[in-house]
């Protein structure tokens, strides 16, 4: 069985290395106590994010009572802290520094160069969004790509695992100047964050994002790279304007016939293949976004749809045979349950054919 994500972090060796680094910069640290706290059984029972936050609390109890002194120690140690333990540094600022912006903001800028401060800026954005956005806008010009990425990632309205930013969900306008500064960034790491930020915004304000993408399209390879990823949710949803932006043809001239399964019943952990014919009734070659979706049955019996891309290509008029493998092996991000799973073939955002795959418990 694959090792769980949380079991890869806060190992005894990594915790001991973390404690040794901190003690070099703060000799008074009770490093053995820190190792004990971060390796005891009750700590290992926590989920990953909870482990990080609890580790921060344990660390805080062993640092000076002065917030400024503690931040100075952590800032010096930051370049040497490796692994998920580095999560503790920006989290220390997040949980203890909200009343001291002059100390906290520069600290997050340092920490994000070695880890990421994207979660820790959220309380500051909630407390004083105008002031925090002004600082992030300044960081968008920073020479370090991790800092520039932080400028975008920190203000994402729907950053996964993070506190949501309802004010920016309602009105993303304050975020947009930051993204404008970063739209042609040399770093793919930064551009990915810009695309993800726009994708977040598109879930509440699709036309705002489409306005931006239409304006950016063709500016450079970097901006074209960003807008394709920024529109992924809208493309999966079949947004007509997004489809038109990328030149996809009218799905009314496309059909899917002969959708078949190699096996219509599959055990959990097993797989099958599906095949179909894409019929292009167009007069000339046409750009097609071909996808399939699965309605996964959850433990509660509810269904959660997931969309997967088959191919994006230009197809000539006529018939095209398509075949793909369909796996029901459990993953760290998805567990399968028995029941009828709906398989849909999607052409340029429109469902063209459907069939059911019956998933059963694996034989013991």
Image (tube, rainbow, N blue to C red):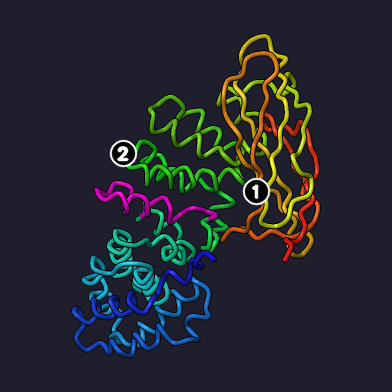
Looking at the picture, how far across and down is residue 225, in whole percent? Answer: 44, 34
Q: Earlier in the sequence, mark 2 or mark 1?
A: 2
- Asked whether the residues under the numbered discs 2 and 1 touch, taking CB atoms below 8 Å apart as contact, a structural biologist would say no
Quick one: label 2, few (<14), some, or many (20+) residues within 10 Å? Answer: few
In front of the other: 202 or 338? 338
For residue 74, above or below residue 305: below
- Name the residue: 50% across, 75% down: 50
Residue 278 inside the magenta-drawn segment: no
Q: Is residue 122 above or below residue 32?
A: above
User: Rounded to the nearest whole Å, what is the CA distance between mark 2 and mark 1?
Assistant: 37 Å
Q: Position of residue 178 (x, y in %)?
A: 40, 45
Out of 293 and 223, give the one closest to the viewer.
293
Bounds of the magenta segment = 136-158
Using a 10 Å C-alpha cutoff, classify the residue at mark 1 as few (fewer than 14 neighbours), some (14 to 19) or many (20 or more): some
Pick the front one: 167 or 227: 227
Residue in the picture at 59% in, 51% down: 170
Where on the picture, by quarter, is residue 199? top right
Which mark is drawn over residue 153?
A: none
Residue at the image point whose x is 71% and y is 46% from the top: 294
Where is residue 13? Give x, y as percent: 32, 77
Q: Assign the N terminus to one quadrant of the image.
A: bottom right
192 relative position to 257: left or right = left
Callout 1: helix, strand or loop? strand
Which mark, residue 327?
A: 1
Give the labeled residue for mark 2: 186
Picture coordinates of residue 35, whole percent (x, y) = 34, 85
Inspect the magenta stretch and tell me whether residue 140 lies in it. yes
Image quadrant containing the C terminus: bottom right
- Up-down: is 323 above or below 103? above
* In the image, farthest residue toward the top: 283
SS at badge 2: loop
């Amino acid at each position: 069985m694959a090792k769980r994500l949380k079991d890869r972090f806060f190992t005894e060796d990594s915790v001991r290395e973390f404690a040794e680094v901190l003690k070099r910069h703060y000799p008074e640290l009770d490093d053995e106590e820190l190792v004990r706290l971060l390796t005891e059984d009750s700590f290992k029972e926590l989920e990953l994010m909870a482990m990080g936050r609890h580790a921060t609390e344990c660390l805080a109890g062993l640092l000076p009572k002065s917030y400024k002194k503690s931040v100075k120690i952590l800032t010096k140690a930051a370049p040497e802290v490796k692994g998920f333990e580095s999560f503790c540094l920006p989290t220390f600022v997040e949980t203890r520094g909200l009343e001291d912006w002059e100390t906290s903001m520069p600290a997050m800028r340092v920490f994000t160069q070695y880890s990421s401060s994207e979660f820790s800026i959220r309380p500051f954005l909630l407390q004083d969004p105008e002031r925090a956005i002004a600082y992030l806008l300044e960081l968008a010009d920073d020479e370090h790509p991790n800092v520039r990425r932080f400028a975008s990632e920190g203000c994402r309205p729907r950053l996964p695992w993070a506190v949501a930013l309802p004010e920016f969900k309602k009105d993303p306008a304050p975020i947009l100047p930051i993204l404008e500064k970063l739209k042609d960034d040399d770093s793919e790491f930064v551009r990915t964050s810009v695309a993800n930020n726009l994708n977040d915004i598109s879930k509440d304000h699709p036309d705002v994002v489409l306005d931006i993408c239409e304006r950016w399209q063709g500016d450079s390879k970097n901006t074209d790279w960003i807008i394709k990823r920024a529109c992924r949710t809208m493309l999966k949803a079949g947004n007509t304007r997004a489809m038109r932006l990328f030149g996809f043809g009218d799905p009314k001239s496309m059909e899917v016939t002969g959708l078949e399964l190699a096996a219509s019943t599959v055990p959990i952990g097993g797989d099958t293949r599906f095949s179909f014919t894409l019929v292009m009734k167009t007069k000339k070659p046409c750009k097609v976004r071909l996808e399939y979706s699965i309605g996964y049955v959850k433990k509660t019996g509810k269904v959660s749809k997931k969309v997967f891309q088959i191919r994006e290509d230009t197809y000539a008029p006529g018939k095209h045979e398509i075949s793909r493998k369909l796996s029901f092996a459990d993953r760290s991000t998805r567990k399968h349950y028995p029941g009828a799973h709906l398989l849909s073939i999607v052409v340029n955002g429109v469902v063209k054919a459907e069939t059911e795959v019956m998933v059963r418990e694996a034989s013991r």
